[in-house]
Amino acid sequence: MHFALSDEQRELAAAVRGLVKRRAAVLGLRGAIDSPAGYDTELWTALCEQIGVAALSIPEEYGGAGFSLFETQVVLEALGESLTPTPLLGSGVLAAQALLAADAPELLPGIAAGEVVALAWADRSGRHRTDGSEVVASQADGWVLDGAATLILDGAQAAHLLVIAMLDGSPALFQTETIAETTPALDPTLRFARAEFRATPARLLAADFGPALPRLHAIAAIACTALQVGGAQSCLDRTVAHLKEREQFGRPLGSFQALKHRVADLLVQVETARSISWAAGFAASNGDDPARQAAYAKSWCGDAFTAVAAETVQLHGGIAITWEHDVQLYFKRAHALAQLFGDAREHRARLATESREE
């Protein structure tokens, strides 16, 4: 088995990296973070128009490119290397896959073109439940929603808001107006929002959405692992470069045997994380049930990125925790992504439960 990227996939990743690098000369990472949208809107437009990143996993009949989820994962890994904030995870993956699962393609052409659509799903504790949500739907003169949702990726900037709500005790998918408000986050490169629903008018998209939630959760977790692998790779690259340049006792730090061993351990963490992330991505792209692969990947990649980011801080020294240095941003993203769509302990507990049931 040839377990590697194809030539086209490598070219896709290179095109994304090149475009991000060129745009960074105009508006860097911190400028994008501080912008009203929380990301570089011109870069996002270029990524969608020139490369079609938001359209990759959307079928051609809905205005997409007709590729698989794995191509989107390749793009996310490339974006994760530079911490480039974009709506790709929340809109191009989460919202798009929810609409496909609901057989409600009306908004898909807009998503493929770069329009931002957000999915409100997480409860007040920030947990994305696979059995529903805290929002409840009822019918008066029309459908209305009551409740709250948190951790809505790019929710305040979205043109449309999708909501998972309980209908007669079962999860359903609704569309409503964007009413989310931005909330502070540990990782400034991820923009989250919170929404309060009080008799909020909505449109029903899918009444029986419960069976789609486990797969949707797995796909979201796998997409997170791509960002984690990209971030871990960048941490490794930055650490190697630093150890080659920084000298102590008249020698580059990288020449000391103890530090070589520590960097070798980082390489093992990064490469094993990439392998398990790709394996999960292939499973999701081939139409298999990705739940187990997602649990393996999210638990391993979350721990790997956290460990690599922490070691990167240690090997850079005190400068790494200053606001001016980018390593602290990787450290924050590692901890934020480790919690998003389930932490390592939660995913391992799910695997243990499945093993006992078998």
Image: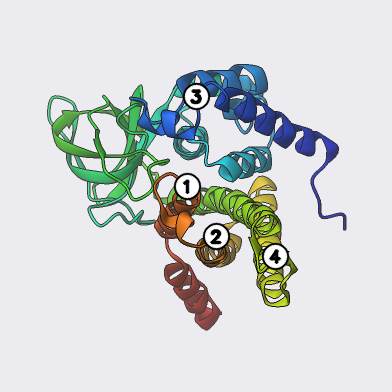
The reply to whether callout 1 and callout 2 are in contact (CB within 8 Å) is yes
Residue, disc 4: 250
Residue at 67% x, 33% y: name it.
17
Q: Earlier in the sequence, mark 1 or mark 4?
A: 4
Residue, disc 1: 325
The reply to whether callout 1 and callout 4 are in contact (CB within 8 Å) is no
The answer to whether residue 272 is left or right of residue 133 is: right
Question: Which numbered tag is attached to residue 316?
Answer: 2
- Front-lying residue, 271 or 278: 271
Marks 3/2: CA–CA distance: 26 Å
- Front-lying residue, 312 or 44: 312
Residue, disc 3: 27
Please, is residue 264 above or below residue 36 in the view? below
Give how far across and how far down residue 346 sits, in percent.
42, 69
Q: Nearer the viewer, mark 3 or mark 2?
A: 2
Residue kind at label 4, given as amino acid type: Gly
Residue kind at label 1, given as amino acid type: His
Tally of numbered discs: 4
Marks 1/4: CA–CA distance: 25 Å
Q: Secondary structure at mark 2?
A: helix
- Front-lying residue, 64 or 310: 310
